[in-house]
Amino acid sequence: MTYNCESKMAQRRFFGTDGIRGEANAYPMTPEVALSVGMAVAAHFGSQGRVLVGKDTRLSGYLLESALASGLCAMGADVYFVGPIPTPGIAYLARSMRADAGVVISASHNPFYDNGIKLFAADGYKLPDEVEQHLETLMEAGALEHLRARGKDVGRAWRIDDAAGRYITHLKQAFPNNSDLDGMRVIVDCAHGAAYKIAPTVLEELGADVTALGVDPDGININENAGALHPEVMAARVRELGADIGIALDGDADRAVFSDEAGNIVDGDAIIAMCARDLHQRDVLRGGAVVATVMSNLGLERSLAEVGIGLERTPVGDRYVVEAMRQGGYNLGGEQSGHLVFIDHSTTGDGMVAALQVLTIMRRTGTPLSRLAAVMTRLPQVMRSVAVARREPIDQLPNLVRVIKSVQDELRDRGRVLVRYSGTEAKIRVMVECEDESRASAYVEQISSTAVNELGKAP
């Protein structure tokens, strides 16, 4: 099947597929924009409301945290600072503390010089498109001047000292009470990010013998040669120490990439496959299907079909995965990149919740990760991004449509084609997967050159 996906975020000024993101202290990630975000959030969720503000470990967090708080207080909202904490930690705390909203200052897996702002509603879920669009309207110059708080109505700022402890307790509840990790050797790479204290603590308190990497943040080393972007570091340590499993988190710990006991990388698709099969076998997989994005490998679809599990696909972005899960009543979904959503335990992607589910299966079955992950056979997947002069709906490009159809007809059910625009750049992305990698590469070249011929080459 061919997917021609237009970005849902194409018309946005600030918000992309996962909040606002860019180079810190350069538009749009400036204190001025952060101030306007704070004011808009307070105005939308209630001027006398309570808003949690967390961040990862990058240097510019201080800059944006203060500006956000100023905007919130200016509209009469009270601010609760929780300090460095994983993105899913804010999602959990916003719900458990009955806040009106939660804000995370993080650029996730991006380098330290970038930053971003992610928003959660009181129920712990990311905001739908229409709410983000309304916030952009409120951020327009002068839109909220008449609503500024005055006198005793100006908001206050507080600091919550036990936020990490609350989240640690929550995480441990995602692991069976009648089990432990005694005797298991675990490598965890925290990418010098938001989970640098939390992740090792959770694993140690459950009894694991933990070797922690990436736990010395200095404001500029987040994600640098560490974590989910560089899982080979974690995998090498697994081999060196003979560990049972390796876990690599990204900077805000909302995703995880794994290594089996032999040091082989296990990505999100393989984790979804093994966890879906486990849930299905125990008759607790809701909806008879799981949700993944258009980027998930065809091998995942085949693995699930073998045992009668369906696969629902969404556009790229874990927020779209969660939306589909909620609409369809599913309790497992995720992305190949390691955003894994176990909605019975978390309202968003959570690297540590995912890790605890994997460890639970390993512990309960006595099966090493290499064998559990073997339920999925990956097809070679070739991808290319091509800069183009303009963007036009793909289904209105006759030559490109013809070539895509020709390739898919040749592949039939033995492969898959995906052509879509980038959500943030003037690029078209082409992906082909099939059993022959060289053949996939040839198809990608054919589709890419056709796209450039029709859309023009970027200057």
Image (tube, grey):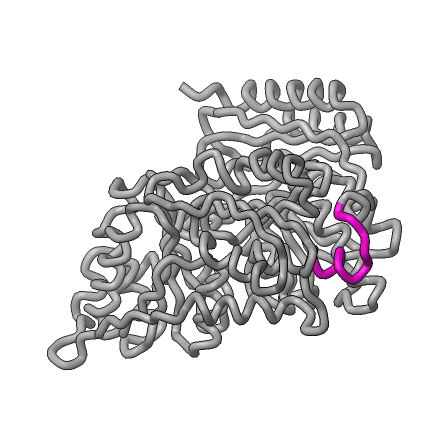
Q: Quadrant of the C terminus?
A: top left
Inspect the magenta stretch and tell me whether residue 359 lies in it: yes
Residue at the extreme bottom of the image, as rendered: 152
Q: Is residue 403 left or right of residue 278?
A: left
Asked if residue 375 is positioned above or below residue 427 in the image, the reply reads below
Residue at the extreme left of the image, as rendered: 151
Inspect the magenta stretch and tell me whether residue 66 lies in it: no
Whether residue 294 is visible, yes or no, is no
Which quarter of the figure has residue 409?
Answer: top right
What residue do we see at 45% from left, 24% from top? 389
Q: Is residue 383 left or right of residue 43?
A: right
Q: Position of residue 125 (x, y in %)?
A: 51, 65
Q: Position of residue 81 (x, y in %)?
A: 31, 66
Q: Position of residue 107 (x, y in %)?
A: 41, 46
What residue do we see at 63% from left, 65% from top? 343
Q: Is residue 144 left or right of residue 222?
A: left
Between residues 191 and 399, which one lies in front from this camera angle? Answer: 191
Q: Position of residue 249 (x, y in %)?
A: 54, 47
What residue do we see at 43% from left, 65% from top? 164
Whether residue 414 is visible, yes or no, is yes
Asked if residue 17 is positioned above or below residue 42 in the image, the reply reads above
Span colored in magenta: 358-369
* Total marks in image: 0
Asked if residue 169 is positioned above or below residue 429 in the image, the reply reads below
Q: Quadrant of the N terminus?
A: top right
What residue do we see at 61% from left, 68% from top? 345
Q: Is residue 7 left or right of residue 450?
A: left
